[in-house]
Structures are given as structure tokens and as C-alpha cells.
Image (cartoon, grey):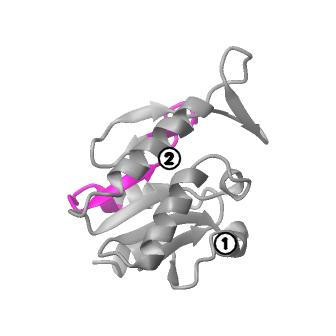
Amino acid sequence: MIYLLTGPIRSGKTNTLQKWIQYRSDVDGLLCPDDNQGKRYFFEIKTAKRFKLEIDRDNNHDTIVIGPFTFLNSAFNRANTYLLKAAKDTNVNYFVIDEIGKLELKNMGLHESAEHIIAAHKKGSNTHLVLVVRDTLLEQVIAHYNITNYQTITTKDLQTNLP
């Protein structure tokens, strides 16, 4: 099953996922929380490794700028590599991609891994896929990745309904 975890921007989707995975060993994938300075980073669920995604604007790095955010291209490359490799693990019940957003709709960011992993899940998988998508982009993401068999869930559903 593909679950689309949706809600408004800054509504606690990532924080709820962090709490949900805290005591689970059957989840892998990638989260994108904020650090203490409000900058986003990637967190590899199984390995518990984190690496910087967002930086202050500068001309010394290969970056993607979207709105007020400046992201490292190298972080997306590493994230895509991790997701594609980790998705082959059949010892997890849930696989998380946080998040599918504006960059992915432009075939950037996590699009490379998301496209491959979503396509694989549409063919059949024993692992449930959890995609984080803000509510205002939900229909666009569904259309972009041609997702037909899915269930939308909220942070409340994640806390109470998923085993």
C-alpha cells in the first residue's frame, strides 16, 4: 500500500513520523526535519545518520534555490543514493520518503528515487510506502507519479491507525 501522509505546511508531519519510528525497527527511508537553527537536514532512518540539506545562500556550493530555501545538490544526490539502495531491503514493513514537494514536481530533489520506488510499489511490494506530501500539492503529486492505489493519511491516522 502507498500511504500519502498529508497536511498543511509546518503541521507536524515530520515530527509525528520521528515519534512514530522512534521505537520501531521495521521502518527505513529518509526524514527531512529541521535542526536547532531551523535548517533542514536529511536523516537516514535505519542508519540514524544525518547530513545537511539546507544552507545559507552562498556562491561556494552547488545549490538549488527554491523560494527562501537554499539546498545542497550533493545532499539530494546522497539522499537519492541512500533511498534507492535502502528500498531493496525486504526486512522492513514501512519505507518513508519525506517529502515529495515542489522540487520533485520539477523532476529535481528526490524525484529520481521517488519515481523508481513508487513505480516498484505500484507493481507490488510487501513493504508499505509512506510519502510525505503537503496538502496543497497532493493532487499534483498523485498525477505526476500516476499514483492510483493509495490511501491518504494525516498525522492523527499515523498515531492511531497504522500498525
In the rendered image, the quadrant that contains the N terminus is: bottom left
Residue at image location 55% in from the left, 34% down from the top: 53
Q: Amino acid at mark 1?
A: Leu
Circle 2 SS class: loop
Q: Nearer the viewer, residue 4 or 9?
A: 4
Give the x, y percent position of residue 42: 47, 41
In the picture, the disc for residue 138 is: 1
Q: Could one spot residue 17 in this view of the protein?
A: yes
Q: Which residues are magenta?
A: 20-42
Q: Amino acid at mark 2?
A: Cys
Q: Nearer the viewer, residue 145 or 33?
A: 145
Q: Nearer the viewer, residue 79 or 53?
A: 79
| Mark 2 or 1, nearer chain start | 2
In the displayed structure image, the side of residue 34 where residue 134 appears, left or right: right
Give the x, y percent position of residue 45: 33, 49
Is 145 located above or below residue 10 in the figure? below
Circle 1 SS class: helix
Residue at image location 71% in from the left, 35% down from the top: 64
Give the x, y percent position of residue 9: 65, 59
Q: Nearer the viewer, residue 83 or 124?
A: 124
Q: Could one spot residue 2 in this view of the protein?
A: no
Q: Main secondary structure of the magenta part?
A: loop
- Look at the image and say whether residue 22 sits in the magenta stretch: yes
Residue extending farthest right: 67
Give the x, y percent position of residue 55: 62, 27
Name the residue tied to disc 2.
Answer: 32
